[in-house]
Amino acid sequence: MNRFLVSSVIGIVMVMITVLSIHADDPSRDKSNVLPVIPVGFDAYRMWDKWPQQRIGVRAYMRSTYDRDGGNRTADASHYLFGNPGEQNVSLDVKGKGVLYFFRANHWHGSPWHFICDGTDNIVRESATLDPVDAKKKFEKTEFIPAESFPEPLAWTWSTTKGADLIWRPMMFRDSFQIAYERTFYGTGYYIYHLFSSEKNLSQPLETWELVDRHPEPDVVALLNRSGTDIAPKEIAKIEKTVTLDSETVPLAEIHAPGVVRAVKMTLPLDDAINLERIRLRVTWDGAKHPSIDAPLCLFFGAGTFYNRDAREYLVKGFPLNIRYDFAAKTVELGCYYPMPFFKSAKLELTGIKPKPNSGKTELHYEIRHEPLTVPVSHTSYFHATYKDIPTPEPGLDMVYLDTKGIEGHDDWSGNFVGMSFIFSHSGNLGTLEGDPRFFFDDSRSPQAYGTGTEEWGGGGDYWGGLNMTLPLAGHPCGTVNPKEAKHEKDLIESAYRFLLADLMPFGKRAVIGFEHGAENLSTEHYEAVTYWYGVPAASLIKTDHLDVGNPESERDHHYNSPDASDVETIFSRYELGIDTFPENTWGMSPEQIAEYKEKIGKEVYPAHEEYGRHTAGVSEFTVTLVPENRGVMLRRTLDYSFPNQTAEVFVSLDDDSAPGKETEWKSVGIWYLAGSNTFYHSYPKEELGTRTPNIMTSNRRFRDDEFLLPEEVTQGRDKIRIQIQTIESKQELLPGVPFPKPSRWSELKYDVYCYVLPIFDPSGR
């Protein structure tokens, strides 16, 4: 047995001991071991009180039209996986059981859009599509067509968002989902979808979405229309007081019983609001050594400052957070409605206060509502708001706003990433918005989420035109068009927010939330962020095995058998990340920064490295180790992305004693598919109505990590399973009549095996 297997076995034994011993005498422990129900479709909105809940067997992905070379070609627009007849330019292609929860395009560009759900083509347009030239001058208000399918607040067009068409309407699929643009000029987009290991624990069946089902659920529309108001339960326990901010720390509340905070509301004097925006809300759950919330008030509630340049009623009219101005009462009202569970106690306080001198005092009124906790410890998670200040970003490297590994004194965390409030400039500079979001979950080396730019993440396009806007789940509440237009020094603070509800992103052991600073990671702006997430300090994904394809010992230990596989190949390449080498661009840098940066010019940012493995047009089989307590399995494959549209049917042996060459009963568990390859095309015609002008390109990034979920029906109670991968040759062409440079093959360099478990931890041991 190799060293990896020895360490894996030891790890598995320790996990089993932990599962059996922790909480052995705790009556609140989930002894039934029943998985929590996963809200899906419109239920993901109406069951918003389940925001903190563990999502076992769910993976979230954010795909986009980003520049495959890691730069910012045409502002990350118009990069397509492949093209089909009828001017269909495919930017997303997925197989499996899932829901598309979010779609974003720049203005109307790309419309008509084809949402091809389980093989049915649903054509969606925007009203500027018919007469798009100079549309900004011709249209004051636009809408999606058919309008009844995409009403506000589930969908918004650029006339409201100041630059983007946004759809939050869930679209379910059972087998496949594809998005294609008919027009490629400025075809920017990003999309968030969930895939499920099983339908067993979903709140409702997955039913293929069709455009004929036009009217969204009215209760969900009504719920989102309540954004900006107090949406939390009213008839529950309430703590309401007025305090004087006369010391560095002022306590707000201590609760000593399992519960859920449902509302945190504060009322500030309007005249003192700007002076109070940087005091911090600090919240500690269950007597932990570290607070889980410790953030400036303004950023925590969704804005970079409380300065209100246009005397708007709302700076933030969000679903979970809001900032409202009552000019008649001369107050600023803050509201937070993220559900916040705790298992023993909660402590809320304000810190960083600078009391006024003896001549005056400042009072703050607040209200905290809470209710009993009624779900098992292993089903839910703590709310966190992690503040990060980055005065000087490091050239070439993404800013990391959150890395849960080691945070609050714990390495492993499982939960959900649910949003951000962030400052991207303190000097009114909008150019830094070219930076892409890149999020990594559970030690993947490929980002499961890769966007097209910072303002796109915040619900805008073209920098929102420099204007402000606030929606239930995205907004640009603060900042001026340019420094010359600033009315106050606080007007130079540019901030945005993005809240994830239906489109939240689960993780099982680690989340890394990063952003480029500018298009090439060279911006020198001062950045700040509050990242909202749910998590408990225990893993729900446990790595139990690793197959190193091409390594004789590893192949032997896993009974790897692939009769038609290639010989072992060594590949020298990169993963898809940022630019390869530091450019000569020093715009915006100080003389001191330029002097330091010049030493980096021409050097590699993300060096290439070697990987080895095999590819096949046939069948691969291998045996992997699990923990019997698993609730499903995630397979992660490292592959060579130069082979296009890799497709295979995955089978699991139902025979616990299955071995190579032995007859066994195989059960199909789905299609494993990865669309496209490192060869793609870029099409950006000179005119708005220009036809497709494809420029075929091949990036130097061949490495990719990809994932597939196995349902617990074929894994639970088993300490090992045998997996069979049957390659399905894809006939997809890059463009009509233009094949991909390589044939379709199944590439396998490595397989990592992760078991889903209910996270078990001791709240008193934090």
Image (spheres, grey):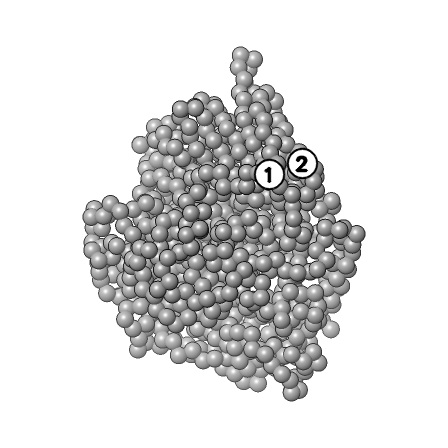
Answer with mark 1 or mark 2, whichever residue precedes in sequence. 1
Residue type at mark 1? Answer: Ile
Q: Select label 1 or label 2 by which is in front.
A: 1
Quadrant position of residue 594: top left
Residue 276 visible at all: yes
Q: Count the marks: how many?
A: 2
Element at label 2 = strand
Q: Which residue is mark 2?
A: 255
Q: Which numbered circle lies on residue 177?
A: none
Farthest residue to the top: give it. 359
Q: Residue at coordinates 62% horizontally, 66% vertically from top-left?
A: 632
Instruction: Look at the image and tell me in which quarter the N terminus lies.
Output: bottom right
| Residue 30 position (above or below residue 552) | above
Residue type at mark 2? Answer: Ile
Q: Residue at coordinates 53% horizontally, 80% vertically from top-left?
A: 726
Is 254 left or right of 416, judged from the image as shown?
right
Position of residue 611 measured from the top left corner of the image (x, y, whole percent): 55, 69
Position of residue 456 measured from the top left corner of the image (x, y, whole percent): 39, 50
Quadrant position of residue 592: top left
Q: Residue at coordinates 29% horizontally, 57% vertically from top-left?
A: 145
Q: Residue at coordinates 58% horizontally, 26% vertically from top-left?
A: 241
Position of residue 578 measured from the top left corner of the image (x, y, whole percent): 45, 55
Q: Which residue is mark 1?
A: 236
Is 287 left or right of 246, judged from the image as shown?
right
- Camera-nearest residue between 626 and 121: 121
